[in-house]
Amino acid sequence: SIKVYGSALSDATVQAMTKDETPTPEVPESKEQYIFHKDDATGANYQRIPALLTLKSGRVIAVADERFGGTHDSPNNIDIGVSVSDDDGKTWSDMTGLDTSKAYQGVAYGNGRFVVISSSKALYSEDGINWTQTTLPVNTQPVSIVYGNGKFVVTARSPQFAYSADGITWT
């Protein structure tokens, strides 16, 4: 049934009316581990735009914007933070930052490898943590990278493109 009151009830009155006498069960101590947090190894104040990827090997890779000084976009310092888990997300590696002062334009995953593009360079990694630099044949700044049909394809601001089967050797 519904009861209508002529005035607002005090907090104490509402608590007394709705008191649940059922004992509260003990809650086990949380074993959660935050992947992204302000005290991670990158030193970033904020994280935004997280993403997770599970590889065929079972490794889970977590990435997010690591933002220094504020949550706003450019021209603020924003790096890419990467952490990995090899036990279905129960534990995570320390967050490492991919230095984005190089103005990376995009990232793609294919053929067991990540590829990030910037200027006339690319970085590749099989684990998302350790990166190796290679050179793109494109003379102008690339704008995007995709992976499909067994190839990475990079497009540039001018009518140029580059492609690679492995993300290391480019044509």
Image (cartoon, rainbow, N blue to C red):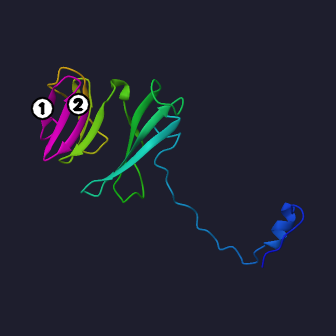
Magenta run includes residue 162: yes
Pick the residue in front: 115 or 27: 115
Q: Quadrant of the C terminus?
A: top left
Instruction: Identify whether 165 is placed above or below 54.
Output: above
Q: Quadrant of the rendered structure where residue 135 is?
A: top left
Magenta residue span: 144-171
How many numbered marks appear? 2
> Which amino acid is tagged 2?
Ala
From this viewpoint, is residue 87 visible? yes
Q: Which mark is residue 122?
A: 2
Horizontal and vertical percent position of residue 94? 42, 44
Q: Is residue 47 left or right of residue 158?
A: right
Instruction: Identify whether 132 is placed above or below 54.
Output: above
Q: Is residue 66 left or right of residue 98?
A: right
Q: Which residue lies at the image location 41% right of the left edge and 51% below the top edge? A: 92
> Which amino acid is tagged 1?
Trp
Pick the residue in front: 163 or 157: 157
Q: Are marks 2 and 1 in contact (CB under 8 Å)?
A: yes
Horizontal and vertical percent position of residue 32? 51, 57
Q: Secondary structure at mark 1?
A: loop
Q: Quadrant of the rendered structure where residue 1 is?
A: bottom right
Q: Is residue 125 left or right of residue 40?
A: left
Q: Which mark is residue 146?
A: none
Instruction: Identify whether 76 is placed above or below 114.
Output: above
Q: Which residue lies at the image location 43% right of the left edge and 38% below the top edge? A: 65
Horizontal and vertical percent position of residue 37? 51, 43
- The residues tagged by marks 2 and 1 sit, at their Cα atoms, a distance apart of 10 Å
- Packing grade of label 1 (10 A; few <14, some 14-19, many >=20) is some
Q: Which mark is residue 170?
A: 1
Horizontal and vertical percent position of residue 93? 39, 47
Q: Is residue 68 left or right of residue 119?
A: right
